[in-house]
Image (cartoon, helix red, strand yellow):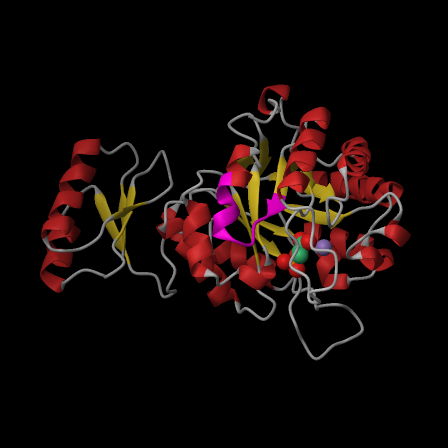
Amino acid sequence: MILLFESGVDESVVRDVTLRLQAAGLRALRGPEPRRAALVVPEGLPPELAAELEAEPTLTLVQPHEPWRLVHRALRDAPSVVRIGGPRGVAIGGGSVAVIAGPCSVEGRQAVLEAAHHAREAGAQLLRGGAFKPRTSPYAFRGYGVEGLAQLKAAGVATGMPVVSEIMDASDLPAFVDHDIDCLQIGARNMQNFTLLAAVAGAERPVLLKRGLAATVEEWLLAAEHLAAAGCSQIVLCERGIRTFETATRNTLDLTVLPLLHEWTHLPVVVDPSHAAGIARIIPPLARASITAGADGLALEMHLRPEVARSDAAQALLPGELARIMADVRVLVALDGRRLSPAASPACSAPPR
Ligand code: PEP
Ligand code: MN
């Protein structure tokens, strides 16, 4: 059950309702909308209490058909805007579009710095790079670990770009926080690793939640709900292609979910056509289609020399190809009255602690 208060309602009313719910042995989770209070009661309301609360003039009770609550569209008046890199960081959602670009793996201090400069010059606002890599084969390059986080953050600071990197194990969380990784990526393989989701929710920074390899939208949104219920209020969803019978591409890019997600959740959604396609040359039209279908941003892999990339070489864009995609995105975003987010203000690029 969702309890929506009238906007501007006195905090004492919200407190009073919370106490009544708790006295009945129910949980009352506070919704993320700052201008309009909302409470989620995961267990639902017993009929007498529902009738009592329905009589409250400042309160509307909403029982969504869908099983998610805190990430439900009904919980907010407007879509969520997630800022990566602090309050003056890069905005994603609510009409602001941002692009995350960079190598699949962090491959050394100089390599990631050069990639960062090219990504920034092309117009991307956020830098990506994996330091802990989930690889199908145990013999493949699995990333430089903590040293890779330091190299990524240094490149982000040098170029004024907040950084995004995948975390695979909750025991690595202190290293991600110490290196001030601005956004924690949950990879497709870990979308339903619920203990990892609860751990990263406690880190008080944005989370990029990729769709599982074969996850339904409901499973994906309930994974987001796990993050939200554990206290994370800055969640960005990422469609990255799903497993189907088709083998011509690495995965099948499911753009059909974009308009639905905007009806079902207030969370922003970005699209990663790189991991969906697995083939660099077909990424530009998929990137354009993603923006046209309503994506709040893109995640794109780029490498200066794709032929020597240590992971996902076949899908790595060249810097010039990234720049052309950015030019297209600028046009498409303006066409539907949205805007490309400005780059983060330098204040967010403090050196790592
Ligand atoms: C990645 O972003 O490099 C990655 C491994 O993505 P996914 O989890 O979508 O496969
Ligand atoms: Mn990759």
Viewer-proximal residue among 155 and 333: 155
Question: Residue at the top extreme?
Answer: 347
Looking at the picture, how far across and down is residue 181, in whole percent?
58, 37
Tell me the residue at 43%/60% (across/down).
194
Up/down of 118 relative to 51, above or below: above
Q: Is residue 237 left or right of residue 288?
A: left
Question: What is the quadrant of the N terminus in the image?
Answer: bottom left
Looking at the picture, how far across and down is residue 170, in whole percent?
48, 51
Specify whether residue 172 is painted magenta. Answer: yes
Viewer-proximal residue among 95 and 43: 43
Tell me the residue at 72%/59% (across/down).
275
Viewer-proximal residue among 79 and 156: 156
Residue extent of the magenta highlight: 165-174
Specify whether residue 120 is painted magenta. Answer: no
Instruction: Tell me where residue 149 sits by quadrant.
Output: top right
Tell me the residue at 55%/68% (across/down).
215
Viewer-proximal residue among 61 and 109: 109
Q: Is residue 128 left or right of residue 14?
A: right
Up/down of 314 relative to 128, above or below: below
Instruction: Tell me where residue 347 sits by quadrant.
Output: top right
